[in-house]
Image (cartoon, grey):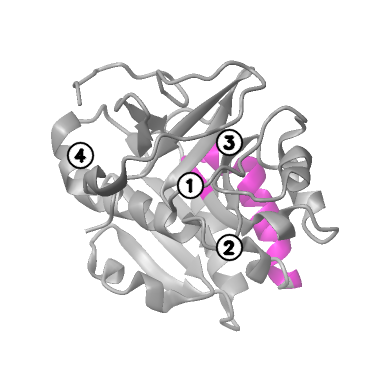
Amino acid sequence: MVKTNRFSLTLESLARLAPGAEIKHSVPGSNVPSLSEVLAEFAPLPHAALLLGLATDGLPILLNLLDALPGPIMITGDEGCGKTNFLRTIAGSINQTNSSNGVRYLVISNNPAEWRGTANSGNCEGILSANESNISNHLHAMVELTHSNRGDGQIYLLLIDHLESLIADSEAQQDLRWLLLRGPARRVWPIITVNSSIAVSEMYRPWLDAFRTRLFGHIENDHLTQLLTGSYQVSFASRVASHQFAMREGNDWLPFWIPALE
């Protein structure tokens, strides 16, 4: 890979596909570098830059956590496409590149056991089960933190794995909507996963408009892809390893992949 200092105010990548192209994804196979290897190759990352993955040309895709323009981020795809690993990679990137005084994160998951070891990081506020009876209290505390987090305040990430398990809690919905609407402007970033079949369901559709940045893993059913992207000219159904994703940039589609977890 070739080092680069290229960094935009939002999402950054040099890989592009022509509009209307099928996302075929170049699969690196056994040559996928680990997260530590990728971070070492591009060190130091720009201030407040979060590594999301690598484009097919090997250049990094970065999120500027000081620019609220992308808004809350939704990671969607079929069951088993790598959504949880994506979130765990984001957490791992924070652990390796940011002090606990700079960037912190809270995880809400319907399977906290998948996050074993993460809780030991100084950047981690906690690993919560979406089924906890007091989960709404934690979200309300995050809202209060957001109200006070201005100027040079810390950056916080709210990593929610399987949003569908959380929005079933009616008490949590109001605070969650506020965080989705106002969080990034106050340096509190909701990054969530949801299965593609649930994302287009009647229960979830009212939440879709909150996510103008959507990252797509493998989706076998092209009709679901059309509903989620608004395009009839793109498919994510090609055979793909669990670390392959794509995002829209303007009229283009950018394929990328996430590093391997150690």
Please give the residue where the numbered disc 4 appears in the rendered image: 39
Sequence-first tag of 1 and 3: 3
Label 1 and label 3: CA atoms lie apart by: 27 Å
What amino acid is labelled 4 in the image?
Answer: Leu
Q: Mark 4 and 3 residues: CB-CB less than 8 Å, in contact? A: no
Quadrant of the rendered structure where residue 172 is?
A: bottom right
Which one is in front in this view, the residue at disc 1 or the one at disc 2? 1
Callout 2 secondary element = loop
The residue depicted at 19 percent of the width and 21 percent of the height is 2
What amino acid is labelled 3 in the image?
Answer: Gly
Which one is in front in this view, the residue at disc 2 or the one at disc 3? 2
The residue depicted at 31 percent of the width and 16 percent of the height is 6
Residue 161 x/y as whole percent: 53, 62
Label 2 and label 3: CA atoms lie apart by: 24 Å
What amino acid is labelled 2 in the image?
Answer: Glu
Which one is in front in this view, the residue at disc 4 or the one at disc 1? 1
- Residue closest to the eye, 47 or 6: 6
| Disc 1: CA contacts within 10 A as few (<14), some (14-19) or many (>=20) | some
What is the magenta range? 170-190
Sequence-first tag of 1 and 2: 2
Label 4 and label 1: CA atoms lie apart by: 24 Å
Residue 11 x/y as whole percent: 46, 26
